[in-house]
Amino acid sequence: MTLSPSVYVLDTSVILTYSGALGALLKEGVAIPPSVLDEVQFEPQRSRLRELVEAGAEVIPPAEEAIKKVRETARAAGEHQMSEADIKVVALALQLGATLLTEDYSVQNVAQLLGVPWRCLTTRGIRKVYIWGVKCVDCGRVFEKPPGEVCSICGGRLRRWRLKAKGKLNFNKELHQSG
């Protein structure tokens, strides 16, 4: 199923941070993966999400093919910390050809790499697409892929490190799209 970009897929971050009326989006169309329903556990956000579903937001699980594509892209971009819910929300937007509403920079980064249009409601959003690795805070060694929880050279703590940027995004458009 392919829907127009005026259909929105909601990420957990939007439900947790946006205090406005999400119900206004229903006239365009809203889709939510089941993983977002599972991730929102506290009130009042859980009630707001339940109201959205009762008012017509569709709960749609993403296809395995779309999930696999998002996982591969996230791995290649070094976005190793993305949750299963993050992966599935991008996969659903990719599958439906919908616009992703998210405040999560990692989700925006992967969506941009896949050509999935996205919007923020409360933040500015990413300005560049980044490819990430990790760097040891003790010896300074940079790894493209995390060798584990600690540096394989000295045993030091690892932290996320920008390896390269893939160019500035065009923010004269209402939606952030590749191309």
Image (cartoon, grey):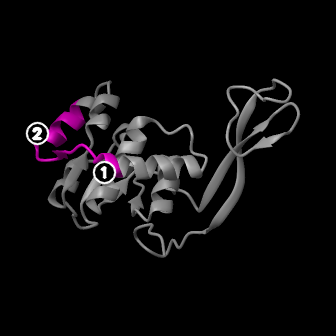
What is the span of residues highlighted in magenta in the rendered image? 47-65
Q: Mark 2 is on which residue type?
A: Glu
Q: Position of residue 84 (x, y in %)?
A: 41, 36
Query: Disc number at residue 44?
Result: none
Q: Residues within 10 Å of mark 1 (few under 14, many from 20)?
A: many
Q: Position of residue 177 (x, y in %)?
A: 44, 69
Q: Position of residue 95 (x, y in %)?
A: 29, 57
Measured in 3D between alpha carbons, the distance from the residue under mark 1 to the one under mark 2, in whole angstroms, is 20 Å
Does residue 142 show up magenta in the picture? no
| Between discs 1 and 2, the one toward the N terminus | 2
Q: In the rendered image, which quarter contains the N terminus?
A: bottom left
Q: Position of residue 83 (x, y in %)?
A: 46, 36
Q: Please tell me whether mark 1 or mark 2 is closer to you in this view.
A: 1
Query: Disc number at residue 92?
Result: 1
Q: Secondary structure at mark 1?
A: helix
- Residue at 88%, 34% in the rendered image: 139
- Residue at 56%, 69% in the rendered image: 169
Left or right of residue 55: residue 151 = right
Left or right of residue 1: residue 132 = right
Does residue 55 show up magenta in the picture? yes
Q: Mark 1 is on which residue type?
A: Leu
Q: Residue 19 versus residue 58: which sits nearer the camera?
A: 58
- Residue at 11%, 47% in the rendered image: 56
Left or right of residue 46: residue 17 = right
Res. 123 in view = no
Q: Residue 136 versus residue 176: which sits nearer the camera?
A: 136
Which residue is label 2 attached to? 54
- What is the tally of numbered marks visible in this picture? 2
- Residue at 74%, 32% in the rendered image: 158
Res. 38 in view = yes
